[in-house]
Image (tube, helix red, strand yellow):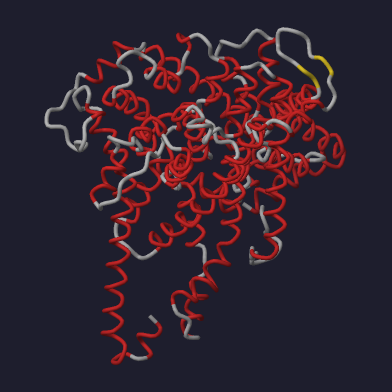
Amino acid sequence: MATAFAHPRKRSWQHIASETIRQLIVYTLLLVLGIAIMLPLLWTLSSSLKPAGAGTRFPPEFIPKVFVWDNYPHVFRMIPFMTFFRNSVIVSSLAVLGELLSASLVAFSFARLRFPGRNFLFLLVLATMMIPYPVTMVPTFIMFKMLHMVGSFLPLVLPPYFGPAFSIFLLRQFFATINLELDEAAKVDGAGEFLIYSRIVLPLSKPVLATVAIFSFMANWNDFLNPLIYLGDSNMYTLALGVNFLRSFRGGGDLPLQMAASVMFIAPCVLLFIIAQRSIVMGIVTTGIKG
Amino acid sequence: MAHVQAKSDRIGAARWRLLKITNRQREAMVGYLFLSPWLLGFLIFLVGPMVASIYLSLTEYKVIKAPVWIGLANYVRMFSDELFYHSMQVTVTYTALSVPLGIVAALGVAVLLNQRIVASGLFRTIFYLPSVISGVAVAIVFAWIFNFRFGILNYFLSLVGIPGPNWLGHPRWTLWAFVLMSLWGIGGNVIIFLAALQGVPVPLYEAAKIDGAGNWRRFWAITLPMISPAILFVLIMGVIGTFQTFTQSYVMTGGGPANATLFYLFYLYKNAFNWFEMGYASAMAWVLFLVIMVCTLLLWRSSARWVYYESGAEGGR
């Protein structure tokens, strides 16, 4: 803009022309890339409504001539979908609850209480995020096996109650921005730390708590490796396992059924994303920039 | 707010003078108490298993019988285990391909979104959407997309006259299919880069413009250095993540064809949970840990040369 002012007559039409071309290129690229990104999802949706055997037809159809809605009920007839769904809801919600409770308490301590070794311990929390899960995977499995918990939801649900590092970090960053004088004022009124935590800090932190809850929900809903390791009985399967399980059935190898099951499996996360996009973006930016 | 502080000081002054030390100690005790969930978790789910893992890696342990001490035999065994080498090679190749390509792609999209455009929110939504979808669902859907004869990818290629390869059926192409699939999930990094781009001070660009710097020059001389901390973060997290690739190969290819997608973690999983070689799997886990640590450290050390921190002190935190 500075240049436009410097040479008003000479540059303006050139400037407009080059700006238009630039915009055109930007929009074309975005449109092409956007379509490419959306295509697999749209194709999943359309394939879930195709007739049986559509997976082995060439050229592939993009919009089915007749919508076969029956693919959805068919999935319910093939696998105990509602059981899997219920299992996923139980595991995910218990995990979210544990993560919110424990991480917020720990983050409160890091952000607003003073004790020796606080900075070192917080660095330790950050360092644990770098440790790859496979390192602890085998011994943790053996531990749960010794406790006779393998086959139950406990190995999936318990760890979040012990302060997951990522959420501690996210919450601490937010808690540290809340005015400390609020705590002082509450202390004058005789409030203890727990009251400050539950009555002042938590109510002021609803957006970031939502972010943590969403990330935790999605991670648990989508988790595949842990359910695979810990859940042996198919009645205990979460939906992530169940959707894959469908493929082992006779007729479950067909495209429309798999896509119908996939659509129902991803729907909660997609809906959650559409509703709470702002919280998600905030969470990613916090970890990526301040991290 | 200042008067609140003053009031608290006045009222608390006498008490503070008397109980200064105990008050502090009390706060510290409450601090540790609130910290206890994490401290317990740290011991139960991290330190404990890590110590146990070191021990197990020095034993032969097949679950049904007690672990038998075999010293470094598991580590020695890796040297002659072809599948160990192979799975490491697959994983390193995949990481070396998908992480840099993913960063370039995410940065490109972020730069596009950072132009003054209408509906930028909508585009951001579109690019991030795949990231909320689970590995299983992605794997199932892409297994169909990559289908040699009936998949839509090869259909599109055939439209422009390219005979599509047997993506998941030929060892030469499978890893490329996985890389393509990974590019679908760059949305999170796009958001990180976009936020970083929006944090670059506009006056810098204007000053460069007055000095006659063109678009490219400005991008290389201002944008890239200014967002290099974000690039380092995405790079390190990307490497740590891709070294742990599992679900895609388990669901899509079962490690095949001809072990072309036998990722390290998949091979480790097979050792631990299919063949109950818990000792060997533990040793493998430590090797993975070391490799990831070395990569992270190398990236971190190299960052002194290419990552620019504005205030110097803010680095990495």
In depth, the one of B170 and B277 nearer the eye is: B170
Above or below for A36 versus B68: below
| Residue B39 visible at all | no
**Whole-percent x, y for residue A69 in the image:** 19, 22
Q: Could you say where residue A289 lies in the image, as x and y percent from the top left?
A: 57, 53
In the displayed structure, does residue A27 sit left or right of residue A282? left
In the picture, measured across the screen, residue B150 lies left or right of residue A278, that is left
Quadrant of the image occupied by residue A149: top right
Which residue is depicted at the point 72% across and 24% down? B280
Say if residue A19 shows up in the picture. yes
> Is A259 situated above or below B188?
above
The image quarter in which residue A278 lies = top left
The picture quadrant where one finds residue A239 is: top left
Furthest toward the left, the residue is A65
B62 shown above or below A28: above
Coordinates of residue B161 in the picture (x, y in percent): 25, 52
Front-most of B16 and A19?
Answer: A19
Residue drawn at x 20%, y 18% is A70
How many labels were placed on the picture?
0
**Which residue is depicted at the point 65% across and 48% down?**
B4
In this image, A127 relative to B223: left or right?
A: right
The percent coordinates of residue B73 (x first, y second) are: 81, 26
Residue at (57%, 40%) from the top-left corner?
B90
